[in-house]
C-alpha cells in the first residue's frame, strides 16, 4: 500500500526526464550602474537569468520585484515580457534594440550601462516542443527563483553555466546544441527545486498528474495517443464511473477528458509535421485518426491552421537551423 505516493512522483519524474528545449537565444551581459533591460514577450518561451557577479532586480507585472544575487537562478515562464534592473525604480531599454557583439546567430555579448558598479549576467530564452513540457510550464508561477544560498544547488548551477559559457564562446561545431542541453539541466534544476519546495501548492495539470486516479488516466493517454480512447475506457483506467471521472478530470485539468486528448494529439502532430519526412497521413495515423480528412478538420479546429500551413512555416526554420549547424 506504500506504492501509491511513489506512483505520482514517478509520473512527474518521467515528465522531467523527457523535458527537451530548443535554444532561442543566449546572452552574456556585462553591465554597469545605472542600467535597465526590457525583455520583450516571446510566446511559448521560458527565460532564465543568472547573475554571476553583482546583483540585479527582476520585475514582472503583477509580482513584487525580486532581487537576484550571484548564483541565484530565475525563470520567467509563459513568454511574458519582463525587466532586469540595477535598482527597482529605474527605467529600461529594449534589450533587442541595444548594440551587441554577436558571436553567432543565437548568442551575443552585451555591454551596457552608466559606468558604475558592475553586474554580470547570463540569460537565455528557450522554447519547448514536447507537449508534456508545455503542460508543465503552464503550471509554473509568474517567477520561479532558486536561491544561490543553497550550497548544492549553487554549485551545480555554477558548473552548468561554466560549461555553457565555454561551449558558446569557443564557437566549435555543435556548441549551440550542447548549450541547449545544458539549458535543459538549468531549467530542470529550477523546476525540480520548485516542486520539492511545496508540492501541495500546485494546481491544474500538475495536481492532476499527482492524483492517483486522474494521473493514471493522463499517463495512459500520453503513452498511447493513437489508441481509440473513449470516456468509458479512460474512466476504467481511473477506476471510476464515467460521470465521476469526467467531473473530477474537468475540475482538475480545466477541460473535459476527450477535449484534452484531442489537444494532446494535436500538440504531438504539430511536432511531427515540423519533421518534413512525415506525411500528413502518417501523422494522422500516429495520433489515432484513420481518416486524413477527419484529422485535418480536428487539427484546424484545435490549432487554427491546416497541417500544410504548419509544415510550410516550419520549412524555413528547418533550413535556417541546418545552415547554423553547419557553421
Image: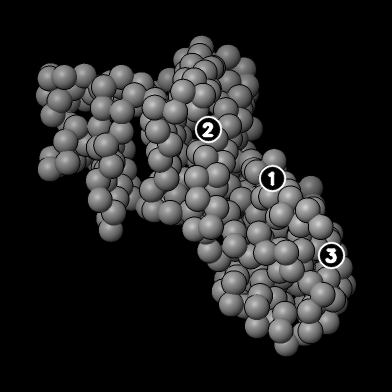
Residue 13 badge: 1
Residue 226 badge: 3
Local SS, label 3: loop
Q: Residue at x 58, y 32 (%)?
A: 185
> Mark 2 sits on what residue?
186
Q: Quadrant of the C terminus?
A: top right
Q: Residue at x 42, y 45 (%)?
A: 144
Local SS, label 2: helix
Give residue 263's quadrant in the image: bottom right
Residue 3 falls left or right of residue 120:
right
Mark 3 Cα-neighbour bin, 10 Å: few <14, some 14–19, many ≥20: some
Give residue 287's quadrant in the image: bottom right
Q: Is residue 260 above or below residue 85?
A: below
Q: Position of residue 21 (x, y in %)?
A: 59, 40
Q: Position of residue 147 (x, y in %)?
A: 40, 33
Q: Quadrant of the N terminus?
A: bottom right
Local SS, label 1: helix
Residue 283 badge: none
- Residues at discs 2 and 3 in contact (Cβ within 8 Å): no
User: Does residue 246 appear in this view?
Assistant: yes
Residue 250 falls left or right of residue 220:
left
Q: CA distance from mark 2 to mark 3?
A: 33 Å
Q: Is residue 194 above or below residue 229?
A: above
Q: Is residue 22 above or below residue 259?
A: above
Q: Earlier in the sequence, mark 3 or mark 1?
A: 1
Q: Position of residue 270 (x, y in %)?
A: 67, 58
Amino acid at each position: 500500500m506504500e506504492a501509491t505516493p511513489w506512483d505520482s512522483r514517478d509520473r512527474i519524474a518521467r515528465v522531467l526526464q523527457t523535458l527537451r528545449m530548443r535554444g532561442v537565444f543566449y546572452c552574456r551581459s556585462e553591465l554597469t550602474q545605472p542600467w535597465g533591460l526590457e525583455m520583450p514577450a516571446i510566446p511559448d518561451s521560458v527565460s532564465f537569468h543568472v547573475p554571476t557577479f553583482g546583483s540585479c532586480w527582476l520585475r514582472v507585472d503583477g509580482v513584487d520585484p525580486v532581487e537576484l544575487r550571484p548564483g541565484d537562478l530565475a525563470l520567467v515562464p509563459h513568454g511574458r515580457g519582463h525587466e532586469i534592473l540595477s535598482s527597482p525604480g529605474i527605467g529600461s531599454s529594449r534589450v533587442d534594440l541595444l548594440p551587441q557583439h554577436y558571436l553567432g546567430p543565437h548568442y551575443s555579448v552585451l555591454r551596457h550601462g552608466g559606468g558604475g558598479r558592475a553586474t554580470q549576467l547570463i540569460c537565455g530564452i528557450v522554447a519547448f516542443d514536447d507537449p508534456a513540457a508545455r503542460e508543465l510550464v503552464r503550471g509554473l508561477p509568474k517567477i520561479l527563483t532558486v536561491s544561490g544560498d543553497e550550497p548544492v544547488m549553487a554549485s551545480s548551477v555554477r558548473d552548468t553555466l561554466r560549461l555553457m559559457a565555454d561551449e558558446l564562446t569557443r564557437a566549435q561545431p555543435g556548441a549551440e546544441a550542447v548549450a541547449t542541453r545544458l539549458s535543459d539541466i538549468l531549467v530542470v534544476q529550477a523546476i525540480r527545486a520548485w516542486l520539492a519546495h511545496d508540492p501541495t501548492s500546485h494546481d491544474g495539470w500538475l495536481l492532476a498528474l499527482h492524483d492517483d486516479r486522474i494521473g493514471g488516466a493522463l499517463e495512459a493517454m500520453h503513452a498511447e495517443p493513437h489508441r481509440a480512447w473513449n470516456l468509458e475506457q479512460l474512466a476504467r483506467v481511473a477506476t471510476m464511473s464515467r460521470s465521476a471521472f469526467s467531473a473530477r478530470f474537468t475540475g482538475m485539468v480545466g477541460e473535459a477528458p476527450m477535449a484534452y486528448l484531442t489537444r494532446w494529439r494535436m500538440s504531438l502532430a504539430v511536432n511531427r509535421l515540423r519533421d518534413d519526412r512525415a506525411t500528413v497521413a502518417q501523422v494522422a495515423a500516429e495520433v489515432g485518426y484513420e481518416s486524413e480528412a477527419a484529422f485535418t478538420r480536428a487539427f484546424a479546429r484545435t490549432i487554427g491552421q491546416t497541417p500544410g500551413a504548419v509544415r510550410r512555416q516550419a520549412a524555413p526554420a528547418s533550413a535556417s537551423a541546418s545552415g547554423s549547424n553547419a557553421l
